[in-house]
Image (spheres, helix red, strand yellow):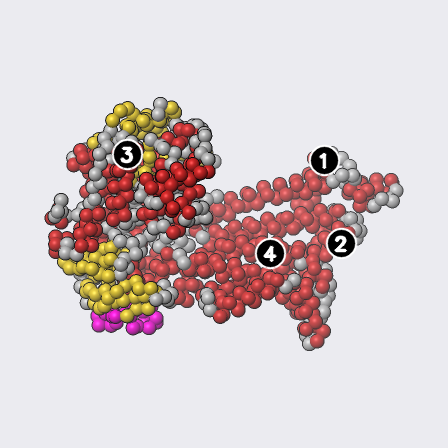
Amino acid sequence: MLRQTEPTCRGDAIALSLAPIGIRNHGDTQSSPARSTSLWPSRAPPSNVAPMLRFILGRLVSLGLSLIAASLVIFVVIEVVPGDPAAFMLGLNANEETVQALREDLGLTGSKVSRYITWITGLVQGDFGTSYTYRVPVSELILQRLWVSLPLAGFALILSTLIAFPIGLIAASKRGTAADYSIMGGTQLGIAVPNFWFAMLLVLVFAVNLRWFNAGGFPGWEAPGAALKSLLLPAVALALPQAAILARVMRSALIETMGQDYIRTARAKGLTRRQVTLRHALRNALIPVLTIIGLQFSFLLAGAIIIENVFFLPGLGRLIFQGITQRDLVVVESVTMLLVFAVILVTFLVDIAYALADPRLRRRS
Amino acid sequence: MIGIDRLSLDIYGMEILKGVTFEMRAGEVFGLVGESGSGKSMTALSLMQLLPQGARTSGAARLDGRDLLTLSERDMCGLRGNDIGMIFQEPMTALNPVRSIGDQVAETLRIHGAAGRREALDLAREKLDRVGLSQIDLDRFPHELSGGQRQRVCIATAIALRPRLLIADEPTTALDVTTQAQILTLLRDLVDDEDMALLLITHDLAVVADMADHIGVMQRGVLVEHGATDVVLREQRHPYTRSLFEASRHQPTRRSAPHGQALLEVRQATREYPGPRKGVRRGPPVKAVNQVSLTLHEGESLGLVGESGCGKSTLTRAILGLDPIQGGGIRAFGNAVSPTMPHAMRAGIQVVFQDPYGSFNPRWKVEHLVAEPFHLISDKPQASERREQVGRALEEVGLSASDMEKYPHEFSGGQRQRIAIARALITNPRILVLDEAVSALDVSIRAQILDLLADLQTRLDLSYLFISHDLTVVRAITDRVLVMKSGEIVEEGATETVFDSPGHPYTQALLAAAPRLPAFSRKES
């Protein structure tokens, strides 16, 4: 049933018909229209856009499913917490009427299913409920904080990537030299030093002594220049340890890639060492680097809490921290959901970046 | 045109090449033969100046009067890919997986400033057509191509700028025989058409005998003999050349013959995989093994030949009881073989795999490795007796009992394959499945292992199922042979009969594609 009379190309006809069935040769199907009767399914004509779109679509479906699963988990966790959330939020000495009022307020009456649906439809419409402590809609709170946290995380990520890529590249291409050793030593230090200590050091040097920057606070985006300036020191403090990790990952991924056969092939074509590194090794080394970048962004978004405290920045990390200490479960719940969404979204983007970097990932879905 | 004069090489003080001297002319194929570690590849890499760190060369390698060994890295970059092209052994990994093939062929042209972007892609199309890939689009990625096709892409890349010299380092070793024959024909055509010189590096004497105008034989960094192909093959002046010849056509003395009843019976076995996805549903299942029947008798050696993807390995896994079958039946020693069969049955069928490097846990001592199958035996021997049995198994395969204290990395490839055999023998099996067990070995080592296998078969009354793509080896050691293609047995019969008068067109094609040593060099036989 595998017999083909029409050679696909001069020569390899026999080899092709023997290739592992459906595994290795799925790409060959397009090479000859005469093979429509063959065992392999016929596919659309080759194009590098269609598989990419198909891949993105597949990932979007899984993104939606993950979100539903996450929202269910968060809802159930809040539900199964022993005791009454309203009573818990109000503390031990609250009187019964206040608790009942809050329960109404929080929508804790009614069946669980209908409450879940109400919560989800609210989330979708941007209605996150009302904060108990602040007495303002949570969406408003989050939006304000997001305008600080998101730029800060993005800023830090860009900085860390900008620092890590060249450093990792240099260390990898000068492997075993003094430059490599000092870079590796430096990154070791960068990982070891706690970022809040480094942040305080930055404040001490650049704010207190040199007076180039404010020691903390955030002026708001009405003055973009001042806002960016106030985010610079925290971003540097956040970025440096991340850059150190990223540079090490970059270096080891590059070194591994440089040992591959296709690097030797490229050298045999006449590419210089530098050209080989930039044109062939870099893109192949990107997969582990992208993974780390994705993880780091998720961390930077909510994990900047200590840095936010050092610099008195009104960010998401501080919001959730205050929410927890003040037992404002509405805020905690919403911010958690938002962070989950952010993490899933970043994972989705990283997946797409994988597929852009490596065509072998596009055909699956 | 290309003259290599007393080329010596050491890497961190270790001598690799010693005074290698030979010449190549345009339009000629120079075949460089030798076993692994003889310095063939290092000779080529010296010409390319792509040697590993710590390498120091002396002597001269002149291409049109310019000494490659004294050129700067900058000049070499201009020369590589332009005047000298090179292709490598492993086509599966030789291409960058994230860039399209057209892009990779065009890169050779662009890097040397021979063409602009568009023009380079047009030329790449032309070169891919030339190497027989006219039906493959430029924007395909390497993983969408078969091994033979990838090697063609590598060749297109290497010849894009019509180099004076093409170096091919074991270009067909990883390929099936029919693909190998096509690639070799392509290389020969290119040499004739483009008037370039080809340095063909291989461990396979038969390949150079077919292809080369001149042959050089290397042993431990020394070019022990070189000259016109027919002269070298006929006269075999150097003892090493002679021993290489004898080893590659080695015929172990077999005293065992099939007797008694069938030990292993496979009847109409069918192994299916789920079909490829078509949207939500799946396509029809793929039959990797389709209604295969075979019988292995006591003391018999049964060969199973076929090219990669024909279903040999799938069948092997079913016979070893590792995978279930979807139709038919497999019986060994009168009982059904299946993934749930009792340990005692597994002890009766043991296997030796191809890769002597990958099939051992590097952190285990040999004693531990060889004793591992003991878990299949119901009454496990005590520690002292265990050591004794391991020692005996090691001695059985020509190692010494004291070797059990060592780790696998302390052994050579051939020795490791002996350890693998010892591990298979430890449970006193009656059937040994040899899955490409000698394919990764040099010819001289291969000859020794084949002798060992023939000897063990007689002494221990073993039956062999010998799976290989190497027709010479199968011919040397089997009584009967099965030829497999696309999951089916297309021909079966006594080994001599099948090889001398193949009935099925596929068997004929296989035999025709296999490179052969010419008859005149069969001097002393």
In the displayed structure, A318 sits above or below B294; it is below
Q: Where is residue B179 in the image (x, y as percent from the top left)?
A: 26, 46
Q: How busy is the neighbourhood of tag 4: few (under 14 within 10 Å), some, or many (20 plus)?
A: many
Which of the chains bears the disc numbered 4? A
| Res B34 seen here | yes
Real-space CA distance between mark 4 and mark 2, rounded to the nearest whole angstrom: 22 Å
Check if mark 4's residue and mark 1's residue have beta carbons within 8 Å. no
Q: How busy is the neighbourhood of tag 2: few (under 14 within 10 Å), some, or many (20 plus)?
A: some
Q: How many numbered circles does the render carry?
A: 4
Q: How busy is the neighbourhood of tag 3: few (under 14 within 10 Å), some, or many (20 plus)?
A: few
Q: Name the residue under label 4.
A: A297
In the displayed structure, B371 sits above or below B59; it is above
Q: Where is residue B206 in the image (x, y as percent from the top left)?
A: 20, 49
Q: Which amino acid does label 2 sit on?
A: Gln
Q: Considering depth in this image, is B252 or A349 the residue closer to the camera?
A: B252
Q: Name the residue under label 3.
A: B459
Q: Where is residue A242 in the image (x, y as percent from the top left)?
A: 59, 61
Q: Name the residue under label 2.
A: A322
| Res A33 seen here | no
Real-space CA distance between mark 4 and mark 1, rounded to the nearest whole angstrom: 34 Å
- Which residue shows up at 33% across the image and 32% down it? B431
